[in-house]
């Protein structure tokens, strides 16, 4: 297969590119490095099936030759990123998705959208199942990311219904692993960096808000299984093992053998109070569920952070 992968120099995109190359696929990686990194794809450049195009996907996309898939992962994905780049986040969700779908339609390729659990907003239904429409503040600071992804899902389904494009939508819940940025701003990079440096570990609010963390290898397996399915409805891919952020901070301090203390800061605006995927659809249709135990995944991620801090 020949695949166009937008956002391929990002954390998840670079893992996915390596996975696909290992399975004999040719990968055209597209990224503008606004949040991705050349370092993430450096080991892939020597692979004969790998090609790189530095481009913002909100501009017209022109790819020579046939394509079997367009995998659209491009987007700022952490609160720090989309608060710094709000307009770019909206544009990549709208114009970027439109351009990527246009390529898929023109090449008669299948289209894969990397969506997010953030489409559920600050949920009033718990755990979150795919039928839930969400509780999103469209004018709040996080709305630029939430609504960009919700719009991207709507446009993906419109191309599927109107033009017959074969589409898949994955809703990704919190994910971690090697190649995350130290200054990513999300909980795991922040906690690990602070703990390894012996600095105070910063928890927002009282730490009672919950998240569900999956290791990147499990996510990539879920994406691959979804690509090889015929399901067009959104599918949650995440670890249903829910924990508080305070518990996460304590786990990371313990695993890092750190003497860091925990300090508390005010909760950001519209920060979700709970987050836990209902993965019944993934289990039933894809035969997928996370296999990497939570502490084991944290150990693997922590080992990589030790090489960078």
Image (spheres, rainbow, N blue to C red):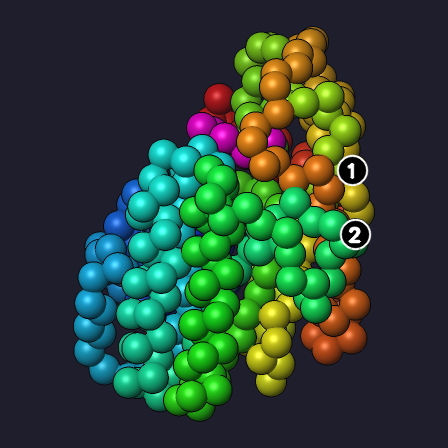
Residue at 70% over, 75% down: 286
User: Would you say residue 39 is visible in this rendering?
Assistant: no
Residue at 30% over, 77% down: 102
In magenta, the rendered stretch is 180-187
In this picture, is 48 found above or below 56? below
| Viewer-proximal residue among 69 and 264 | 264
Q: Percent from the top left, x then y, of residue 61?
A: 22, 69
In this picture, is 163 found above or below 287? below
Q: How many marks?
A: 2
Classify mark 2: residues with Cα within 10 Å, few (<14), some (14-19) or many (20+): few
Which residue matches tag 1? 243
| Viewer-proximal residue among 229 and 298 | 229
User: Would you say residue 135 is visible in this rendering?
Assistant: yes
Decide which of tag 2 and tag 1 comes sooner along the chain.
Answer: 2
In this picture, is 255 found above or below 157? above
Classify mark 1: residues with Cα within 10 Å, few (<14), some (14-19) or many (20+): some
Q: Classify residue 204 as left or right of residue 149.
A: right
Q: Secondary structure at mark 1?
A: strand
Which residue matches tag 2? 126
Q: Do the numbered discs 2 and 1 sit on residues whose CB atoms are within 8 Å? A: no
Q: Secondary structure at mark 2?
A: loop
Residue at 59% over, 61% down: 171
Q: Percent from the top left, x then y, of residue 198?
A: 60, 10
| Viewer-proximal residue among 203 and 125 | 125
Q: Classify residue 142 as left or right of residue 103.
A: right
């Amino acid at each position: 297969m020949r695949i166009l992968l937008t956002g391929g120099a990002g954390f998840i995109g670079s893992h996915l590119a390596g996975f696909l190359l290992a399975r004999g696929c040719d990968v055209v990686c597209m990224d503008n490095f606004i949040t991705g990194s050349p370092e993430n794809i450096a080991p892939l450049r020597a692979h004969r099936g790998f090609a790189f195009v530095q481009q913002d996907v909100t501009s017209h996309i022109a790819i020579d030759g046939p394509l079997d898939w367009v995998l659209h992962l491009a987007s700022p994905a952490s609160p720090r990123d989309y608060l710094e780049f709000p307009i770019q986040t909206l544009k990549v969700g709208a114009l970027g998705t439109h351009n990527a779908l246009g390529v898929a339609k023109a090449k008669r390729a299948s289209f894969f959208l990397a969506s997010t659990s953030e489409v559920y907003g600050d949920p009033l239904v718990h755990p979150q199942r795919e039928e839930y429409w969400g509780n999103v503040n469209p004018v709040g600071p996080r709305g630029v990311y939430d609504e960009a992804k919700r719009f991207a899902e709507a446009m993906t389904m419109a191309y599927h219904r109107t033009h017959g494009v074969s589409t898949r939508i994955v809703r990704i819940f919190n994910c971690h692993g090697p190649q995350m940025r130290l200054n990513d701003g999300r909980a795991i990079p922040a906690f690990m960096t602070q703990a390894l440096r012996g600095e105070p570990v910063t928890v927002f609010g009282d730490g009672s808000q919950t998240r569900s963390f999956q290791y990147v290898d499990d996510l990539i397996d879920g994406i691959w299984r979804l690509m090889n399915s015929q399901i067009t409805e959104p599918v949650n891919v995440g670890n249903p093992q829910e924990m508080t952020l305070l518990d996460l901070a304590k786990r990371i301090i313990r695993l890092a053998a750190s003497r860091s203390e925990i300090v508390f800061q005010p909760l950001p605006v519209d920060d979700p109070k709970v987050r836990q995927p209902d993965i019944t659809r993934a289990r039933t249709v894809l035969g997928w569920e996370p296999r990497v135990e939570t502490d084991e995944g944290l150990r693997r991620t922590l080992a990589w952070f030790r090489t960078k801090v």
